[in-house]
Image (spheres, helix red, strand yellow):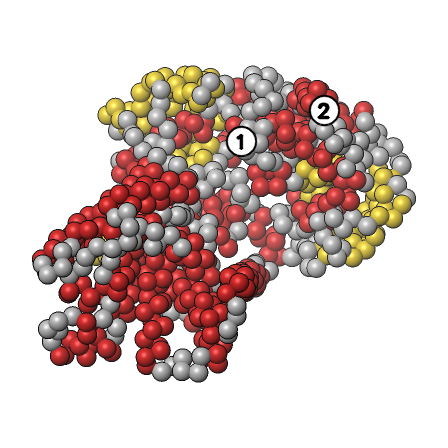
Amino acid sequence: MRVLEASGIKKQFGGVVALSNGNLSAEAGCITGLLGANGSGKSTMAKIIAGVHNADAGEVRYEGRRVHYANPHEAKRAGVAVVYQNLSLVGCLPVWQNVMLGIERKKGLFLDNRYSRRKAHELLEHLLPDLDIDRAVETLSPAEMQIVELAKALAEEPKLLILDEPTAALELAEVRTLFDHMRRLAQHGVAMVFTSHRLWEVMEICDDVVVFRNGETVAQMDLRSGRHSPDTLIGYITGKEESNEERQTERLTRAPSHEIVLRTKHISHERVLRDVSFDLRRGEILGVGGLAGQGQRELMLALAGFYRHLKGEIELQGRKVGLTRPAEAIRENVLLVPGDREAEGLFLNHSLGINLIFPRYGLGTQPLFERPAQNREICRNAVSALSIKTSSLDVPVRTLSGGNQQKVVVGKWLSFDIDVLLLCDPAKGVDVGAKRDLYDHIVELALERHTSVILYASDNEELVDYCDRVMIMYEGRIVDTLEDRDVNADTIIERSVNTGDARARAESV
Amino acid sequence: MNPNRTRVAPRLRRVFAQPEHASLVVLVAMVVIAAILQRNFFAPTSLMLTIDALGPLILLTMGQAVVMVCGALDLSSGAALSLYTCVLTWIMESGHPLTGVLALGVTIGVAVLVGVVNGIGAGYMRISSVVVTFATSFVWLGIALFIRPTPGGQSVNWFNAFFAYDSVHGMPKPLLTFGTVIPPVLQLVLLACLIWFLISKTTVGRYIYAVGGGEDSAYRTGINTARTKTIAYVINALFILLAALFFVGQNQSGDARFGEPFTLQTIAAAVVGGISLTGGRGSVYSAIVGAVIIELVNKIIFFANIPYAYGTLIAGLIVIFAIGVSQLYTIYSQRSLAKRNAPQ
């Protein structure tokens, strides 16, 4: 049975066309994948179905009837639930109140808290058995929050469930748990729409897939036949075609020099970094891999000067340096692209231009009065170098799509002489096309400007595609360094897991 | 694990992670200092005077706290207080007890209207609550000045009951005793507490915290955030009305400029009591503690014989100190909570 059928949806925000011709249908008991680059309109589509936005044109049919939801409340009552990408949880309320928020049952006038707690407990029992439902949501990890968000959607007993990038914050084992639950829901006849940037996830869980590009539905395919490869999907998403092998041969032909730019000797920090020593060569892209949360992020922060009481030594070009404040690291041209771009990398409400030029103010070499022409020149170079899609330098960064925002975080360092570039999961939440632009530019930096790059990516494929060497971290230590032909997905996973204990092994399968 | 089982250790930890418990420490310190400076602090008559001075600020602060928990502010609360005293004394005619009932009814209507207007601006029109209530404060002041250009007005005799039972003619004996044991102003505070207790057990109470804690999240969850904010402003307006009843009972007159100094005091008191300026956090009852601390600061300044010229400065420093203590306490306790919750 067709639960949802949306056709010819149009939506504009100000002058920007988010959707020009969106089509999407979902059937009871089926999981429909929704693929597309950032800014291709898939989030907008999800929000229109959920009643957050109103469509400018087109029609949405839900259970055969034409519907027009004025607000999320109406959609919810009809049985449409959404698991939002950037969550809809209230941080200061406990888990159980969040799960039942908006659908509380009442005893007469008053809240039936006993029922709410029981219901929340029942829902989370399978999803996250160890969770204390009295904990405030803000104290949970991102993955736990994502699960609570799912439980919240399930509490509404929806007929149509929209999952907007629910796996972005999850680790492999958690993704598997989520998929198990989705399959169970499908058996109960729930229609689901699932979006993700990870192709293998869509290939694995979805029955059919809809691809969006530039606000339009460009393809609609049945995946059950097994005739479609990930490469054809990428082709639809980007409009171009290219395979992995090309990039890998390209990587293997690169030869970084033997000059050592950065050397760390036995650096340690609290319990997150233990005795980390390594060399970074000029023009090299050095990957940091391993299971998530083994100190990779902390290593980046340590090198970027975030830890005042870091133990051990750091040498830059043979010179001992103390990187105890971010400003010092920047002055030494050790530059960080942080993992959470919205919180750490950007001034969301400020213009693109200000975001690109701002780091220069920290140098102390900026003239007293601004030189607008010179600044615009720097900004324009960054915009064209990274092919950031924008109508002008004056638009707030907030209005750019995720992929373009991420390019801005990289772009703000481009006018510096970068010696060491630290990248913390730069492609997180970035679509395939923008991801390629971004990495192409990073490779170019390494090749032509001889910038040394340390790359931490949660997606092993990025490490395999672009890194000369990959260090594997486990519990704050570097346990292995892979070179040349060893840099491949299988070896990375094998080394990440085998160095860990039995628990880690169980988690990653 | 049984979801309804009470687990003591984490519960206790959570209790101590609340900023209002820092303010309790400050409160005890204030009471001790006040009792040392004013020898007869605990004597019934002096305690009664203290309570009479405290009560209205507690009522106003509780109202402000409701709005702050909902993620907004009310800069018009002092002006609204003045307006209510003016409306009450404008309608009442001494010697006609029934005009008191009429005045009460009309002013309740005015209070609801005041709350709704603030709510429409800050909720439905999505204007910053600071801007909206700063603007409406002049409207309330303007109306108050229009109906009562100079302080004055009339009151009916039974209205004195909101201040002291013994100044009401023909008050029955048992009620008189009751009024001495629990002074009227305390009754008003208890009434406010009861109202909030009941509201906090309904969806309205839950949604006020949800909207303050994350307006976007609450909206996407299907909560009517504009209506929730409006209800918060109406509750605030009614709590302000309770304070107005006390003042009219005490002074038998209205004054358009009377409430102004209270506005910022209520915000300071709420913050001292542990209500977050960003919303969603803090207990409305802890506003009482904050209000008591602010009032005791004034008392201490008076009894310490500090010259008037320095009084305000020192009061300000004490308030900063109190806020600092509660903030440090919150940061510290939440950090230790986070550490304990971190997966190993």
User: As drawn, which residue projects farthest toward the front?
Assistant: B150
Residue found 81% across the figure and 27% down from its top: A449
Q: Residues within 10 Å of mark 2 (few under 14, many from 20)?
A: few
- Residue A154 visible in the picture: no
* The label number, if any, that marks residue B293 in the structure image: none
Look at 35% across and 63% down and name the residue there. B58
Image position of B164 (left or right of A102): left
- Pinpoint residue A120: horizontal percent, then vertical percent: 36, 54
User: Foreground: B160 or A17?
Assistant: B160
Residue type marked 2:
Arg
Q: Nearer the viewer, residue A472 or B261?
A: B261
What residue is rendered at 60% in x and 27% in y? A352
Chain letter behind tag 2:
A
Task: Answer above or below: position of A182 versus A237.
Answer: below
Quarter residue B157 falls in: bottom left
User: Residue placed at 78% from the left, 29% from the top?
Assistant: A446
Q: Does residue B121 lie above or below A302 as drawn?
A: above
Q: Position of residue A29 (x, y in %)?
A: 34, 35
Query: What residue would you read off at disc 2?
Result: A371
Q: Chain of mark 1?
A: A
- Depth order, front residue of B159/A136: B159
> Where does label 1 land, which residue?
A398
Label 1 Cα crowd, 10 Å radius (few <14 / some 14-19 / many 20+): some
Q: Secondary structure at mark 1?
A: helix
Type of amino acid under label 1: Arg
